[in-house]
Image (tube, grey):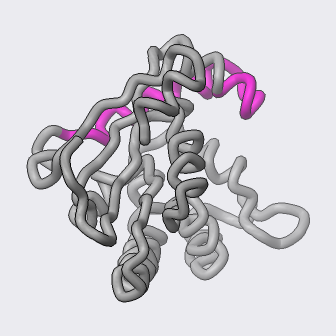
């Protein structure tokens, strides 16, 4: 894959249940700082809770008063306009926090692994020296999602269909991208990642 700088930023991306988290764990074990963009999203939901509730209604609030991500997810994955609205609320804060954490890691000369399904959509690939695109066959991803989330098949397929536009070719021009397939034994996948 070529030489990386002393404190590189490597992006991990791919569609649902392709194996990004498994790959991120391999980087973590090697001492890299792993930034999980989903976690930034969870924090942004809480910080922007009132705007989210005003936009999507109080029905997306859980019994504990926090945003119920499953309820909100059912709304936004079913409707592109709703998804765009939610992203307009939380993505600016997420991008700002990710950039600040990457800058801090660079000052500490610490390598960063940026784990983000929306890496290209959020323009986070612009921070990266290279990107590992984790891929797995659709049926395997559906099986993994069913096992992990316990959602009905139609919801899983709907979410996967909504991800089709995440990897637009025009956004991929500014970074080296390496495809890593994750459909064989775990040890084989791990060897291909690091």
Q: Residue at x 41, y 30 (%)?
A: 192
Give the answer, above or below, for where 42 lies relative to 2: below
| Image quarter of the N terminus | top left
Image quadrant of residue 114?
Answer: bottom left
Q: Is residue 167 magenta?
A: yes
Q: Nearer the viewer, residue 160 or 9?
A: 9
For residue 35, say whether it is visible. no
Give the answer, above or below, for where 159 lies relative to 59: above
Image coords of residue 118 (percent x, y): 39, 51
- Extent of the magenta region: 145-168
99 with respect to 46 (left or right)? left
Image coords of residue 123 (percent x, y): 26, 61
| Image quarter of the C terminus | top left
Q: Residue at x 66, y 64 (%)?
A: 57
Give the answer, above or below, for where 147 lies relative to 41: above
Q: Nearer the viewer, residue 177 or 188?
A: 188
Image coords of residue 48 (percent x, y): 58, 78
Q: Nearer the viewer, residue 82 or 40?
A: 40
Q: Is residue 135 magenta?
A: no
Q: Residue at x 9, y 48 (%)?
A: 173
172 with respect to 69 (left or right)? left
Q: Residue at x 83, y 72 (%)?
A: 65
For residue 139, say whether it is visible. yes
The secondary structure that most of the magenta stretch takes on is helix
Furthest-right residue in view?
63
């Amino acid at each position: 894959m070529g030489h990386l700088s002393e404190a590189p930023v490597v992006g991990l991306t791919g569609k649902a249940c392709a194996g990004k988290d498994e790959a991120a764990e391999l980087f973590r074990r090697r001492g890299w700082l792993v930034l999980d963009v989903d976690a930034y999203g969870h924090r942004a939901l809480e910080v922007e809770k009132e705007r989210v509730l005003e936009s999507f209604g109080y029905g997306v609030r859980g019994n504990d008063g926090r945003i119920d991500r499953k309820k909100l997810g059912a709304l936004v994955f079913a409707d592109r306009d709703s998804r765009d609205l939610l992203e307009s609320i939380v993505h600016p804060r997420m991008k700002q926090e990710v950039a600040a954490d990457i800058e801090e890691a660079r000052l500490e000369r610490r390598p960063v692994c940026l784990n983000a399904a929306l890496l290209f959509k959020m323009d986070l690939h612009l921070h990266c020296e290279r990107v590992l695109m984790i891929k797995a066959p659709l049926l395997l991803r559906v099986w993994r999602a069913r096992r992990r989330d316990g959602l009905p098949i139609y919801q899983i397929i709907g979410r996967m269909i909504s991800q089709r536009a995440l990897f637009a070719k025009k956004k991929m021009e500014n970074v080296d991208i390496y495809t890593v397939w994750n459909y064989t034994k775990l040890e084989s996948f791990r060897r291909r990642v690091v």
